[in-house]
Structures are given as structure tokens and as C-alpha cells.
Image (cartoon, helix red, strand yellow):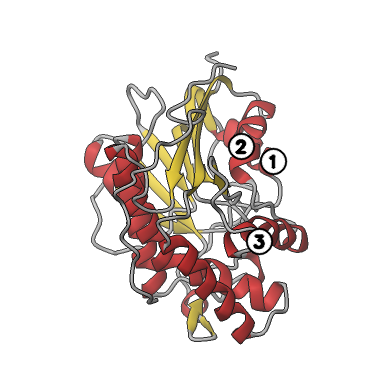
């Protein structure tokens, strides 16, 4: 397997002038759009998907949709585009776990001759979309109903904690991608890192890593999608694998202007989406009280805003090709 890295190994140089501390603040039968899909569930002031409720821990309300849009902006900036795979001519594209549909819509705009299908368990996508883009409501953990050798490109992004068996998912993708087609997975690691050991010992950021190990074990769905994606894609039979590992700083503390811009967007995304990402897992799965969860999230926000904490996450981009026939 070939591997290329983008700022993954070298220590990030700290901008000593960045002393601004932010103010505190806050597969089977395809499902049709029947009325039950819109029967959302409210918990602790957040709206969650109702259909197959136990399968997903994240909210789908407006607050989280804003976070998803910020995430899309960040990924597009970091990748300098919508994807990293060396695509040439594409006719059919599948976006797995499409969320609000922004990636699928942008791809359809860029490739007007391609048919783009987005799949998600929640019907939260817009109705005004390019004519070559459509959305289906389905659970990707069920058997897929598409024809074999159908897609030129399958795109997966930010699907940690949602897949029961990553190898099986990629096996299904392999079956439904045409020979010579590509798969790409983009994931952010839940392991918090620091090159200069400035993450507070015993603090929220340090505890964050262990929390998602425990949540994943209880759910039976790993939150380490970033770490296992390359192995799962390769195990499914894809070749010509490439992996990039990129550091995403928590904020604007790096001296490098590019990393500073990435960090600003990443922190914005985290502050907007951190409650939605964690609240249900902490209260429903780990059985914390609501107040305990909010105290932890407040500590987490303080550490994310602290310019003396030089932490980061790894963003991993993996793509591979189904061998040509």
C-alpha cells in the first residue's frame, strides 16, 4: 500500500503571538418517505431521528445541521476540493451517510453528467437540488439494493460510530462498484493528540478518547473509523490504496497560516457540534446525568478555546480502486 502524508509527522510549530482566549459560550429495502420517517424524537432539548432510533446517536436538528455545513466547508478547504481519489470519467456516484446532502449537491454541480445518489437514515436533505442529484432514506447496515458493478465512485465521510462491520460495508461497496471504480473514506479520529503535551492531564480532552472507546463497545459500533478504514478497504479487495494523515489543530495556535485556517474552522465546527456529538452518548449510553454531561462539555469547550492547549485530531483520507476486469 502506498501512503502519502500531509503534515502528519512533523511537530506543529506554535504561534507565540496567538494569545486570544475565546469568550465562554456555547442496504435492504429502500425506505420511502413515509410519514413515520418524520416522527422525530426529542431528548434534552435536541431532536433525533425516530426510525431505527437505536442505530444512531446524533441529532438531526438545525443546530447540528449548521455544524455539518461547517464540517463540509472545513473538509473542502483541507482537501482543496470534494475528494482526493484520481477520478476521471464518472457516471454514477454514491454518497453514504450523506446527512444534509451538501457534498452530494456540490459534486452534482461539479459533474453535471454524473448521477449522484445520497443515502441517509434521516430525510433532512433539501428538496431544491441539481437535476442529477437525488436522495434515498435507507440504513447502510442493511443489504444494498443497487445492481452489481453499478457505481464509479463511492464516498464515505464522518461515519464513525454508525457501522456495525466496516469490512462488510466495504465488501458491499466492492460488489456494487464497477471494475476500475473508486472508493474514498474520510474520517476524523476521536483520539486527542498533542506534540508538546499541553493537553491537561485528566481533563476533558484527555478523557474524550476513552469515552468513545467505551461508547463504541456498548453500541457495538466503533468510533475508530479513522484508524481502521485503510485496513477494512484493503480487506474488501480494493487495490491502489493511498492514505493521507493530516493534523487538524484545535484552534488558531499553529504558526503555519494554512494550519491556522484549518484550525479556526475545525474549532468552529467542534464548538457548534460538540453537544450534539456527545450528549445522547453520555446520558443514554453511559448513563451520566444531564448535568454531569453539561459540566463535562463546558470543560471541553474551555480546553478547546485555551490557546495554551496545542491539541489536534488526525484527519485520515483513504481511497482505493476496484481492480479493473
The picture places residue 18, in percent across and down from the top left corner, at 31, 52
> In the displayed structure, does residue 301 sit left or right of residue 256?
right
> In the displayed structure, does residue 211 sit left or right of residue 97?
right
Query: Which residue position holds label 3?
Result: 207
Please indicate, yes or no, whether residue 173 appears anywhere in the rendered image: yes
CA–CA distance between discs 2 and 3? 23 Å
Q: Secondary structure at mark 1?
A: helix
> In the displayed structure, does residue 123 sit left or right of residue 77?
right
What residue is drawn where x is 65% and y is 73%? 282
Q: Nearer the viewer, mark 2 or mark 3?
A: 3
Please indicate, yes or no, whether residue 124 appears anywhere in the rendered image: no
Query: Which residue position holds label 2?
Result: 229
Quadrant of the image containing the C terminus: top right
Q: Quadrant of residue 108?
A: top left
- Placement of 324 over or under 84, stated as above or below: above
> In the displayed structure, does residue 196 sit left or right of residue 271?
right
CA–CA distance between discs 2 and 1? 12 Å
Which residue is at the front of the view, 278 or 8? 8
The picture places residue 284, in percent across and down from the top left corner, at 68, 77
- Placement of 290 over or under 298, stated as above or below: below
CA–CA distance between discs 1 and 3? 30 Å
Label 1 CA crowd tier, 10 Å (few <14, some 14–19, many 20+)? some
* Mark closest to the chain's N terminus, 2 or 1: 1
| Marker count (numbered) | 3
Q: Secondary structure at mark 3?
A: helix
* Mark closest to the chain's N terminus, 1 or 3: 1
Q: Nearer the viewer, mark 2 or mark 1?
A: 2
Label 3 CA crowd tier, 10 Å (few <14, some 14–19, many 20+)? some
Amino acid at each position: 500500500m502506498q501512503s502519502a502524508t500531509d503534515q502528519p509527522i512533523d511537530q506543529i510549530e506554535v504561534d507565540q503571538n496567538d494569545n486570544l482566549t475565546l469568550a465562554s459560550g456555547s442496504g435492504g429495502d429502500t425506505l420511502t418517505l413515509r410519514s413515520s420517517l418524520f416522527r422525530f424524537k426529542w431528548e434534552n432539548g435536541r431532536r433525533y431521528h425516530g426510525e431505527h432510533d437505536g442505530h444512531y446517536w446524533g441529532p438531526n436538528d438545525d443546530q447540528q445541521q449548521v455544524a455539518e455545513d461547517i464540517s463540509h466547508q472545513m473538509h473542502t478547504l483541507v482537501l482543496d476540493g470534494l475528494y482526493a481519489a484520481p477520478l476521471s470519467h464518472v457516471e454514477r456516484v454514491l454518497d453514504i451517510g450523506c446527512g444534509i446532502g451538501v457534498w452530494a449537491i456540490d459534486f452534482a454541480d461539479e459533474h453535471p453528467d454524473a448521477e449522484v445518489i445520497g443515502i441517509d437514515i434521516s430525510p433532512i436533505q433539501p428538496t431544491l437540488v441539481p437535476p442529477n442529484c437525488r436522495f434515498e432514506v435507507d440504513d447502510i447496515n442493511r443489504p444494498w439494493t443497487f445492481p452489481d458493478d453499478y457505481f464509479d465512485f463511492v464516498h464515505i465521510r464522518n461515519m464513525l460510530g454508525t457501522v456495525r462491520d466496516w469490512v462488510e460495508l466495504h465488501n458491499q461497496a466492492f460488489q456494487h462498484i464497477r471494475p476500475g471504480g473508486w472508493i474514498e473514506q474520510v474520517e476524523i479520529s476521536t483520539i486527542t493528540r498533542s506534540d508538546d503535551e499541553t493537553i491537561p492531564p485528566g481533563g476533558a480532552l484527555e478523557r474524550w478518547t476513552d469515552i468513545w472507546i467505551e461508547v463504541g463497545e456498548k453500541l457495538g459500533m466503533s468510533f475508530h473509523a479513522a484508524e481502521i478504514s485503510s485496513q477494512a478497504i484493503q480487506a474488501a479487495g480494493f487495490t491502489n490504496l493511498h492514505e493521507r494523515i493530516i493534523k487538524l489543530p484545535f484552534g488558531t495556535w499553529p504558526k503555519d497560516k494554512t494550519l491556522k485556517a484549518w484550525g479556526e474552522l475545525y474549532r468552529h465546527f467542534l464548538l457548534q457540534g460538540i453537544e450534539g456529538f456527545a450528549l445522547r452518548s453520555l446520558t443514554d449510553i453511559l448513563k451520566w446525568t444531564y448535568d454531569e454531561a453539561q459540566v463535562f462539555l463546558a470543560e471541553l469547550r474551555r480546553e478547546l478555546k485555551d490557546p495554551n492547549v496545542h491539541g489536534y485530531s488526525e484527519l485520515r483520507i483513504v481511497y482505493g480502486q476496484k481492480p479493473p476486469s
